[in-house]
Image (cartoon, coloured by chain):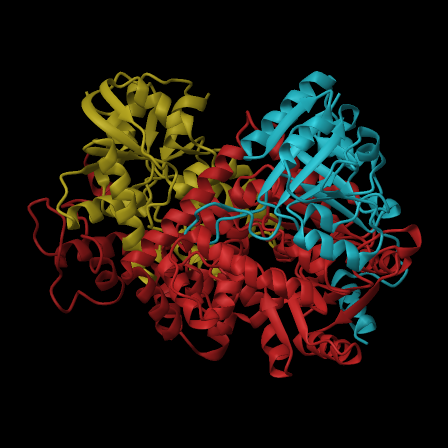
Chain colours: A red, B yellow, C cyan
Amino acid sequence: MSAEFQQKIHETLADANLQLAIYTATGRLKDKRVENVAPDVLPDYQELRAQANAIKKHTIENLDYYLEEFERNVEAHGGKVVWCKDAGEVSDFILGLAKERRARLIVKSKSMTTEEIDLNESLEHQGLESVETDLGEYILQLAHERPYHIVAPALHKTRYDVAGIFSKNLHVPEETVPEKQTAIARAVLREKFLAADIGISGANFLVADSGAVCIVENEGNARLTTTAPKIHIAVAGIEKLIPRAQDLATFLKLLARSATGQALSVYTSFLSGPRRAGAGEIDGPDEFYVVLLDNGRTKLLPDRARRQSLYCIRCGACLNTCPVYRKIGGHSFPWVYSGPIGAIITPQFMGVGHEPGLPFASSLCGACGEVCPVKIDIPKVLLDLRSEVKKAEAREGHSRLERLAFRAFAWVMTHPRVYAMAGRMAAAVAPASDGGWIRHLPAPLAVGPLKAWLSQRDLPPPPARSFRDLWRMR
Amino acid sequence: MPKRVSLFVTCMVDQLFPKVGLAMADVLERLGYTVDSPEDQTCCGQPAFNSGYRAEARTVARHFLKTFESAEAIVVPSGSCTSMVAHHYAELFHKEPETLARVHALEKRVFEFSTFLTEVAGVEDVGARLEEIVTFHDGCHALRELGIRSAPRRLLSRVRGLELREMTPAEECCGFGGTFSVKFAELSGAMARTKIEAIQRTGARTVVSLDPSCLMQIQGACSRAGLPIRTMHLAEVLASR
Amino acid sequence: MSRESILHRVRTALGRSAGDPPAAPPPVRIRVPESDREARIASMMARVEALAGQACRTADPRAAVAGMIAGKTAVASNAEFLAACGITDLPCVRSGLTDRDELRAACASADFGITSADYVLADTGTLVMLSSPQEARLISLLPPAHIAVVPAERILSGLDELFSLVPDPAAVSSSLVLITGPSRTADIEQILVRGVHGPGRIAVVIAG
């Protein structure tokens, strides 16, 4: 793994306050999820998961068809689809439109896709003001930080951190009570909503038969973002498509429960185009755009075993349940997507060489796959990526010693007498023990894996005789 | 029902925890099985597979196939090794139809120990006695890949004098994860310590599991922390009289 | 534009050609449970209250609303049901707004937004609101408190029933919003705070 990855993990593990914050916050979300998908609460949970998986599989396998259907229906309802292959094209489009409409102020609701392409940065670089309106994202925007968690972005910030961030950036007196902090943000952002020229949102689902975007939230900022300004732009990855509005009866039952344990989040918006002034609709945007983003998603399509990585509905359940995420947190990961889903999509988007240690930063416990509402087999993809990392390393001549070690392993394990002898030799050089576990090894032995093991735990004392020897003696 | 079973003790039991293998044999013989343990056995190949070295894993797997192909029933004191053979061998050989056919034939005859007792031998009471307060650690492969949850608990419930206390939270990884435990040692250690805290909250002094690798991780961490908590493999509990 | 190149990449990856029909999708899964109206009403009210909303059932919705708004200012939607209940001619209630800017200004300064709802979902305590000349979007969004007055027969069992009655919301309106409880966040130390951007107080009045 890279030194950077190792260092970030180490720093996070060493920060006791952060450890507690991550563990407690994810623990709460994890427990709420379990409560709300329990058999007495959601008896058809497993059926719904199977259905969601089947719908996503079908949609991804026929993605071109659904993309075109979606576009036709968006246009039929007076909206426009903008196809963007990368971050540059998205910002070119938005900047171009902003210029044409003389727009200066943009409000944004939560969208991991826009984090992925650093949209705010490119808009601000061109002199636009683009304000995050989700409370957690707003705090992070002021602090110039990346989200820590897909659903709970400011999980790592205490109220004291927030007090400092607000007083420094908003020039208000320090306020440490969360309700009051929220009220401060509400007041500031309300003005922005009502003055904004453009509202940019993400989309949890793109509904092909309706040309609609479906947005799920708790605060109301996405509703305001998509209702108050005259222009609404929804930015979404091409994989967000589902075939039919009626499929939401399946997905909506899974999403909020998996994310936060709520039966439904507070607001679910189903938006199909600009305000229909002709039909007498009173408010809503005059212009409606859906940006369909590739940005590498098409790279994940060809491999049949790995394309399930695109089924993700960004609920965050895998993060909350992952014993590794719950220790190393979101900022240890090299990209905006963290946790188990981040671990499988990052190497696929960026190449396995981007962070070769990433697929290995897992004990393969399988908890993620068990909680995924769309049944992505995350452990399987991790194993597959590990194999790809090793093949790449072989080609490039890295990790020679490890490769040699595993070749030796394979040879020893196919030569039983050699294996038995190797076992006896290891037992012979092990320090004498009274049966107690071993705390230290003499310097020549305390290397590599043994040293790493001993840094955290004791070693079992090798027995005088192996099982095979004892069995033979029976 | 096969009257003869072959033990695949696993390399870890063979080299580090031989008593587990003997205990398993003991329990099975008491149930009337003839037990053998093929001399040529070594490893299931999981360390190579999990580390991304599939060719090397295949080499070891072929040896396993050869060694155990003629066994009537293979009993294994490990969830992760059983899962490797029963679930992942098919993946390893999906491009070799002939070997794949042999794998599929073998898959049906490989059993994790507690599963063998409850589902093949059809017993829950093996006549064991152990006066202890224990807690049970569900190893992740056994739990999630093999779906084993109630079998070990049913067996433990029939051990005379035994009190089982469940951990909260339950079903959390101990942090072993094979080479993960040394590649990400600090992280693995942190996960082990969280597991130990859960164990301590039960008040139990003994942790029981189906997987020797989990037991090694947990016991190693307890020992390092100076805690008087010991681990026992399920087989050792069931062999106690 | 990148439309053609993206579609081309998708098709190449999937082994599909332009114009290929899709495989048959998994059938829609809609299971509408049996439930009687009384059970639905009770369930809905319990759910709203569990979310810290207010729920009541009354034969006199006008009085109930009057009590709630008690001298504060309110903007009411143009829903016929509200007019029929006499709510729109309560003192301090402004209604009949059709100009977007006027409506926004009124909502931004009102203490209450009063609407009806197209449906209510019993199993989650959810209001279903379609944008129309009768129901503007901002009324249930800008004011700090929201009152929804709904006739009992509009209560459905849940999402499945909604999507079986309204399989094509886009045909009906540009906006369908499901409202389940008051606006909330737990972004700061996981502490629950209500009324972040949307209304922090919500009341559902079931008439009948």
Q: Quadrant of the C terminus of chain C?
A: top right
The residue most toward the right is A278
Quadrant of residue A119 within the rendered picture: bottom right
Q: Which percent across, then down, holds residue B145?
A: 48, 40
Quadrant holding the N terminus of chain C? bottom right
- Residue at position x 26%, y 67% in the image: A448
Vertical side of C15 occupied by C87: above or below: above
Q: Is residue A375 left or right of residue C63?
A: left
**Count of numbered badges drawn on the protein:** 0
**Looking at the image, which is closer to me, A202 or A220?**
A220
Q: Quadrant of residue C85?
A: top right
Residue at 72% across / 68% down in the picture? A198
Residue A348 relative to residue A61: left or right = left
Residue A471 appears in the rendering:
no
A395 or C49, which is in the foreground?
C49
The foreground one among A68 and A460 is A68
> Is C186 displayed left or right of A291 in the figure?
left
Res. A381 visible in picture:
yes
* Residue A357 image offset from top left, x and y in percent: 43, 67
Instruction: Decide: is A354 above or below A186.
Output: below
Q: Position of residue B128 (x, y in %)?
A: 24, 19
Q: Nearer the viewer, residue C113 or A383?
A: C113
Q: Residue at x 55, y 51 (%)?
A: C196
**C85 in relation to A191, above or below:** above
